[in-house]
Amino acid sequence: MSSSSVPALQVPAHIGIIMDGNGRWAQERKQLRTQGHLEGLKCAKRIVKAASDLGVRYLTLYVFSTENWKRAAEEVGFIMGLVKQYLKGELDFYRENRIRLRHTGDPAGLPPDISRELREALEETCSFEGMQVILALNYGGRDEIVRAVRRLTAAGLPPEAVTAETIRRNLDNPDIPDPDLIIRSGGDHRISNFLLWEGAYSEYYFSDTLWPDWTETDLADAVAAYQKRERRFGGVKP
Ligand code: FPP
């Protein structure tokens, strides 16, 4: 199915993507894992454009988790380099397409140069009214919830004021609606600490295709599968 054949009205407003499979993509080609991440970055650019063309309003990309620091220092350094390259190199594209860049995750744990580039890109694009791309960077779903509860307790709220609603309002981006669709590439069927709170009623789509091989068609297929789902949010069919 081509991306243009997806009816605009049924497009999920918010899609989250676990971009998995870069390392295996490289290994299959007897290349370094870092080459897989480089291809993964190219793929992310392709999918951002495809999502914007489809009319998706919010796209959250799982770039680097709170657990990814356990990887070899060279791999971590390489991914951070790619993030920096992305933040600098994509600004013209963001300006042209009026795309707003957002962040979810703990900014405190980021290397200072990445933190600075990120802050500048967020400021530069903050008034753009097109699609919003949320980079999950130093992100963990559990960590996000812990930070939200800490904000509540730091504000001196009594225990009875800790509710689902007050926690929700203290998550990283409370103005962004929960993801309608969460996609994972690369064949594994797990959520890996991604949008734990926000994904409570998301539809999940798992694809065997490794992330660097993802194209506009894969995204359109995921959206088409989403359109066949019946969402009940814990209720029953009327
Ligand atoms: C998971 O694949 C991928 C990552 C941990 C890094 C994702 C980063 C990028 C796609 C590049 C940066 C993107 C942007 C938008 C700045 P894996 O390494 O776990 O793959 P494997 O399961 O095959 O080992």
Image: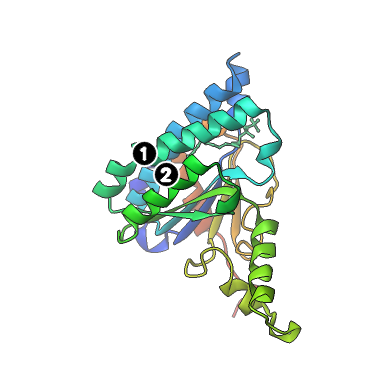
* Badge 2 residue CB within 8 Å of ligand 1: no
Residue 230 image offset from top left, x and y in percent: 57, 65
Percent of width and height locating residue 138: 60, 47
Q: Amino acid at mark 1?
A: Lys
Left or right: 149 in relation to 84: right
Q: Residue at x 35, y 50 (%)?
A: 52
Give percent across and percent down for residue 156: 67, 80
Does the rendering let one see residue 235? no
Question: Which mark, by number, is residue 117?
Answer: 2
The answer, for residue 163, to whether it is visible in the render is yes
Image-quadrant location for residue 155: bottom right
Task: Give 192 or 140, whichever is nearer the viewer.
Answer: 140
| Along the viewing direction, whichever of 5 and 155 lies nearer the viewer | 155
Q: Which mark is residue 88?
A: 1
Question: In the image shown, does 208 or 100 lie closer to the viewer?
Answer: 100
Verify CB contact (< 8 Å) between mark 1 and mark 2: yes
The residue that appears at 53% across and 61% down in the rendered structure is: 180
